[in-house]
Structure formats: structure tokens, C-alpha cells
Image: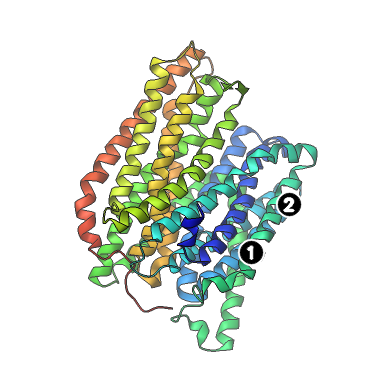
Amino acid sequence: MSHIWDKQPKGLYLLFFTELWERFGFYMVQTILVLYMSKGLKYSDNAAYLVYGAFSSMLFLTPVIGGYLADRFIGFRQSVVFGGILFLIGYAVMSIPSERALFLGLSIVVIANGFFKPNVSCLVGELYHEHDPRRDGGFTLFYMGINIGSLIPPLFAGALVAAYTWGSGFLLASLGMVVALITFSVGQSRLEGTGGIPSISPLHKSASIKIGFYLLLALGILVVIAVLHLLFLYPKEADIVLILGSLATLSVVLYFLFKEMPEQRRKLIACLILILISVGFWALYNQTYTSLMLFADRNMSKELLGITIDAEFTQFFNPFFIILLSPILSWLWVSLDKKGMNPSTPMKFSLGVLCMAIGFLFLGAGIYFFHSGDQSSPWWLIISYFIQTIGELLLSPIGLAMVTRLSPRHLVGMMMGVWFLTLSAAFAIGGWLATLSDVPKEATGTNSLLIYTHAFFIYGIISAILAGISFALIPYLKRLIGTAQGPISTPKR
């Protein structure tokens, strides 16, 4: 794999490891959060799910605001540092064993994600020139770093909190963020000046303006943390606020879109269409944590190659396959580009959605025709995850690269935030889709298997329809995008 890295900018090393350690901390929290609420704080399952759902949705609303602040005021590098510091504080606060501390920590983490998540991806995009064929490969390698970070915590988080306390898990997440911040701070020279304060920022005008801005920013962060803390106390009402927030954010994006020149506007419209396609993909992909998890618990054989496994263990395969396949696809895109055969971004998106359809239809057919009693082989689920992971790698890292390619430089941070905003909508739609696999408490194992089989076939059909729409839109999207493969040429920072 070393020859793949050698062809990439040196700054990719830095951002790869920064994101790896940030994801390590984040997925440490994700692994233990619901269990902590249920066992540590004695929440009912329903209450724990409501708080977790509100937290997940909020996480993907703030990146739009964080991206805008980076685009217009503070730049990508400062945003990453601010986000890292807030992550560190938020995780540390969550280690205090109380509901109030949990809500305060979650609120800080939501703000941290807004500063960090879109802008570290934007920094990756800034490493490449306008027509650089290494861009898609670089984002694929960057995506591999994300998944290495997410792969590690489930291996030992349970043993850690069992041996010590729930707080030890949150403190370890905070320590991971310390490593990420040190990594980023020490290696910033590798970025070669990219991601600094933009030239259009008013912070260049005078020291008094800069001081006033940062005071207002700090005050704004405190106010938003207080509002989010209040929403966690009323998670049902929070759903309404989150929906209104999503609509307001999209309205702002459309406002900026129609202010652009025609050529830039066409590329942004193409970007938004592809982002909408991704909503359907992620809604189906998120069955991993709902219907597919419960299927594995109830109707999957727990023997694999002579080893006893549980439903939680199945979450190992997606990040494992991503790590395995990422360098292969990264090499493939560069190789195909040299031969003039690199598929367009719309084609990669369409193939990704098609893989989702094939994965669900394969799983549904496998467990329908080849089950034993009310149990099916884990191999059907594992192979389905393998196919869907190929789809994820065709869509997610390519989508990150697309945003940096099609967006004007002065809007790339905000559009990256919109990309992450779609995940908020996808969580809501995915939850509704999961109800199609609802199994009554009195159902037998055989009935449960039939319900899941029916649901997986429906998911496969929905995915196939979405893939058909995506393939049909390819000619139109290619006309909107035009022949240029790099980002829009606008004044640099």
C-alpha cells in the first residue's frame, strides 16, 4: 500500500491520523452511550433511545454552521482546533456520573462536531489542485482512516467500563482527542499554508474586530450549548426543533445557490441532487444499527468458523471491509484515470446505490431459501455487508470529494456541512423504514424470520428503484457538471 501513499500529498498523512484519533474518541462514546444511559443512569429503553436519537440528529445539523464560519471567517484549520478542544471538554464532562453532566457533555460534543467534521474534510480537498486525479483516491484513503478509528473501540470498550467505571470510557475518548489535537498541531506545516483564515474574512481588518468576533463567537457557543442542553431534557419536542432547523438551513443554502453565477449554480444544483440521492442510500444503510442488528440477534446462527459470536460482533465487518477495500479502490481510480476510463461521480453514486440493492436482495433470498428452522447462516449477512460496503465506498468518500470539486471555494465548507446534514434526515427516514421489520413480542422464531425476509426484500426493491432513478439522471447531471473535473476557479483564500 505504500506506493499509494507515496503518490498523495504529505498533508494527507496528517489529516488521516488526526481524523483516526478523533473517530476513536467519538466511537468510544457511541459504543457505550446507550448502555451507560440504560445501566449507569437507569434509563428505560425508550428514554435512552429518545436521547440517543436526538443526539444523532443534532450532530449532523451543526456542521453547516461550522462550515459557514470556516468559509467566511476563521478558516478550516482554526475550526478543526476549536472543534478538537470542544470534543475534549465534552467527553471529559460526560465522565461525571450524572444526567446533567451527560446532557451538558452531549451539547458540547454537538457543537464540537460542527466545527471539526466538515472542515477536516475540506482540508483534504485543499491539498489537491483543480484537475488532480488523485483527489478521489485521497478521500478514499482518508475514509479508511475514519474506519480504523471506528474499528478499535468496540474491541475493548465493554471490558474497560466493566473493570473500572463508565467514566473511564468517556475519559479515554477525551484522551484520544488529545492525541488528535497534538497530531494536528505538530504537523500543520505539512498543509503548506492551506486552510488559513480566508482572504474575504473581516478578521484581517483590525485587531479590535478580531477580538470582538471571538468574544461574540464564544458567547454564541455558550448560548447554543444552553439551548441544546434544554432540548435534551425534552427529546420529543427536540424533534420538532430539529426539523425546523433542517428546513431553515436548506433555505440558507438555496439563497446562496441563487446568488452564484450560472456556471457555478449548475454545479451546485448537481451537487444538491447527488446529496439527495445519498439521503436514500444512508436511510437504507442505517438498517445496520436497527433491523439488521435485531435480525442478527434473533434469527442468525451464532457459530462462525467454529467461533461463537453475538449480534454486536457483526458490527465489526463493515469497518473491516472498508479498511480492506479502501486502498484497492484508491489505486483503481488513479489507474482508471490514466487510461481515461475513470467513471464519473454520478456513475459512481449510481453504482453505490445499486450495490445497496444487491446486498439486501442477496440477504433476503439467502435467508428465505437456505434457512435451518428459524436460524440462518451468518455468511448471508456478512456477504451482504461486503456488497453494501463496496456501495458505501463508491458513494461516501466520492461524495466528500464531489463537494470539494463542485462547490465554489467560498462555499465549500458550508456545502460540506450540507453533505453531513443529509445524514440527519437519513436517520429519521431509516427509523421509519426499520418499522417495516417490526416483530410482535408474541411472534415465534419462524414468524420473525419471515418478517425480516419480507422487510429485506422491500429494502432491496426501494434501493433498486432509487438506483434506477440515479442511473437515469446521469446524462443530466453530467451536463450540469460540465467537462471540468476540478473545483470551481474562484479567488483563493
Query: Dividing the picture into quarters, in which one does residue 493 lie?
Result: bottom left
Question: Which-is-in-front pick, marks 2 and 1?
Answer: 1
Per the rendering, the mark at residue 183 is: 1
The residue drawn where x is 45% and y is 53% is 140
Residue type, mark 2 in image:
Leu
Is 309 or 170 nearer to us in this picture? Answer: 309
**Element type where label 2 sits in the image:** helix
Q: Is residue 155 visible?
A: yes
Which percent across, then down, holds residue 390?
41, 41
Residue type, mark 1 in image:
Thr
Which percent across, then down, holds residue 473?
22, 49
Which percent across, then down, holds residue 481?
25, 61
Query: Taking 211 as reference, is 3 above or below it?
Result: above
| Left or right for 300, reference 160 | left
Query: Dividing the picture into quarters, in which one does residue 455 lie?
Result: top left
Per the rendering, the mark at residue 328 is: none
Query: Taking 188 as reference, is 231 above or below it?
Result: above
Residue neighbourhood size for the residue with mark 2, other residues' Cα within 10 Å, grouped as few (<14), some (14–19), many (≥20): many
Which residue in the protein does label 2 denote?
171
Q: Earlier in the sequence, mark 2 or mark 1?
A: 2
Q: Is residue 431 visible?
A: no
Q: Residue furthest front?
A: 3
Q: Residue furthest right?
A: 164
Which percent across, then down, holds residue 81?
60, 67
The image's colour scheme reads: rainbow
